[in-house]
Image (tube, grey):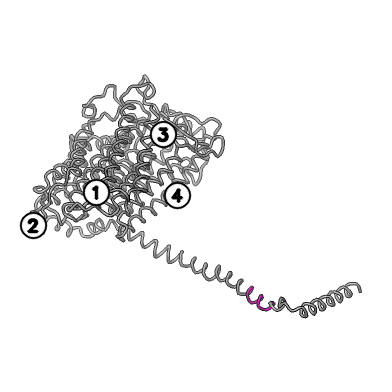
Amino acid sequence: MNTTIAIFILAIPLFMFLLLGLCGKKMSHPLAGILGTCGMGAVLVLSYITAFTYFFSGSPEFITEAGERLQVVVFNQTWLQFTDTLIIKLGFLLDPISAMMLIVIPTISFMVHLYSLGYMRDHHGVYEHGFQRFYAFLSLFSFSMLGLVVATNIFQMYIFWELVGASSYLLIGFYYKKPSAVSASKKAFIVTRFADLGFLIGILILSFYTGTFDFMQLTSTPVEGAQNIFHVSADTAMGVKEWIAANPAPTFMGASVLTWALVLIFMGGMGKSAMMPLHIWLPDAMEGPTPVSALIHAATMVVAGVYLVARLFPLYIMEEAALNFITVVGAVTAFYAAMVACTQVDIKRVLAFSTISQIAFMMVSLGVARPDFHHGIGYMASMFHLFTHAMFKALLFLGAGALIHAIGSNDYTAMHGLRKYMPITHITFLIGCLAIAGIIPFAGFFSKDEILTACFGNSVVWYVIMSCVAGLTAFYMFRLYYLIFWWKEHKIHDPHHTPHDQPWTMTLPLVILAAISCVAGFVPFGNLVTWNGEPMFDHANFWTNLVHLDWGVAGISLGVSVIGIALATVMYRKENPLPDKLSNALPTLWDWCYHRFYWDELYMFVTHKIIFNCISRPIAWFDRHIIDGAMDGLAYVTNKASYAIKGLQSGKVQMYVWIYLIGALLLGLITGLCLM
């Protein structure tokens, strides 16, 4: 593997961030945007070369004669060394999931860069204030996520993990003059910091007992000379339970140290991927520009948690309790987010809750994955859905951006009937809806079906729950589609401004992503990305996914999705009283869903009424009156004493002689009394 190419994949976006951040104000707006887009275009080309070389070259450097794909460290430089075994390095790891992300991240990021050239200026051609700063932050975001996915060790991942958090803070709060944007950016930053504390503690526990941060040592071969109480060979899943039984790890509160470490590490993933109860930041993150929403939701921040679990999956399969925890959190989150999405009126918030639900889908798939069932199909399905979801969710968000740019509002009540005015946006948005709903032959059908197959193989309970979520997904997405493009005729308030498709810089990304969403499901993912690198099929071609479908599972899930679409069609294709009747029939449920089950109010109650009033105020009173009072009292006594004795240093010689004489006489008297 060419080391120079790998270095440039990381160096170019970092250089663009520094260039645009330091010199952007001296550039014209178009130049800054073009430079940022060209830089990401170069990263796209280099990343594609790297990924396609890894997957399709057939080189023995990347694949064994048995077809097993290998992990390759392109470069790895020592940064900090604490002991002989505890070393932090910065490097570039190439394996199936990192190669896959080298396709996903640059693709979406380049589309966002190109799209923003049109989105970040108004209908009169005036660019947004801070346009250069926006492109600098996009480059930083892309650099951070690329550094995260190619990390050779968990501490390098943590460094870039925090950079992703900082980048999201900057982009969500891009409109820093809007109080809501500032509040949303702080909310995202604070919530994810609490989660990252758990992540850091988990890293420290894991590294303490294994003696390493390195991914290849943690998940592949034993660590020589280290207290590796966790590891067994990842060549086969057989014997894992027997090995743990023969080599018991330390326990705490009834769970092994490995379980605690993995759950705490997953806590970091819960924050980044917006799993309950750490999901509250993501809907408010819509305060940033819409292209930012596409980047966060499709290719960067929220998929980091899924990628983290996948990266450490050989460890997670050793602790079923940790996987069960992931499954429960994912299933509850998926169902909750789908319910809430059915009632929202802001199109970006519908898509935000859709993202939460779909990311939870991926988490459930990882949670139910077991190596002894169809080669760990849940792992492959999760990564497959991550890949396909990135494409059609970016398409949906950029489509929403085109609508908002044309109408000037996020609220669907300001839209309706736009199919006649924006035909390209209409068709591409419809393709995105069909893909996420899981309609054959669009991409989401294949990846969702693999997840449901994995759920069915683990437990019928998870299969039923996730099938219901799939049906709700189809319903709320087509509810959104019909309310935007159908429902009733659009009212044109300004005769000089009729809604229309956007410039080519915004339309071209929609067309490309729509085309990918149509064909991505046919990628033979089972032979490219698996938990142990072994191919799932003897021969793979364009029709492999269709041939190997479990049509029993696929038929039921497809039927559920069709029912969801049909219900949305009846209720929302044309204006009618059915939606109002339904909300009036179930007012409590509708109200709870509309208000997101009052999670924000619960957090406000806990923080303001309990933490601030019951904990922070007493601590502040103790600090002001006891701590500060003691210090102030000491200063007061010292001050008074100094005033009382200041005459002893008056500067008068006569006074000093008298004091000396009196002191000498007293000393003589005391000495005499002692000798008697």
Of all residues, the one furthest to the right in this rendering is: 676
Q: Which residues are magenta?
A: 638-645
Q: Which residue is mark 3?
A: 92
Type of amino acid at the residue the image marks with label 2: Pro
Mark 3 is surrounded, within 10 Å at the Cα level, by few (under 14), some (14 to 19) or many (20 or more) other residues, namely many
C-alpha gap between disc 1 and disc 3: 33 Å
The answer to whether residue 671 is magenta is no
> Disc 1 to disc 4, how far (Cα)?
28 Å
Question: As shown in the figure, which amino acid type bears the numbered disc 3?
Answer: Phe
| Horizontal and vertical percent position of residue 331 | 31, 45
Q: Nearer the viewer, residue 624 or 611?
A: 624
Lower position in the chain sequence, tag 4 or tag 2: 4
User: Is 336 situated left or right of 518 in this image?
Assistant: right
Residue highlighted by disc 4: 197
Magenta stretch: dominant secondary structure: helix
Say which element carries label 3.
Answer: strand
The answer to if 639 sits in the magenta stretch is: yes
Mark pair 4, 2: CA separation: 54 Å
Residue where numbered disc 1 is placed = 351
Is label 2 or label 1 in front?
Answer: 2
First along the sequence among labels 2 and 1: 1
Q: 10 Å neighbourhood of mark 1: few (<14), some, or many (≥20)?
A: many
Whichever of labels 1 and 3 marks the residue nearer the N terminus, that label is 3
Closer to viewer: mark 4 or mark 3: 3
Frontmost of labels 4 and 2 is 2
In this rendering, position of residue 239 left or right of residue 183? right
Q: Do we see residue 632 in this rendering?
A: yes
Dot 2 corresponds to which residue? 495
Quadrant of the image occupied by residue 104: top left
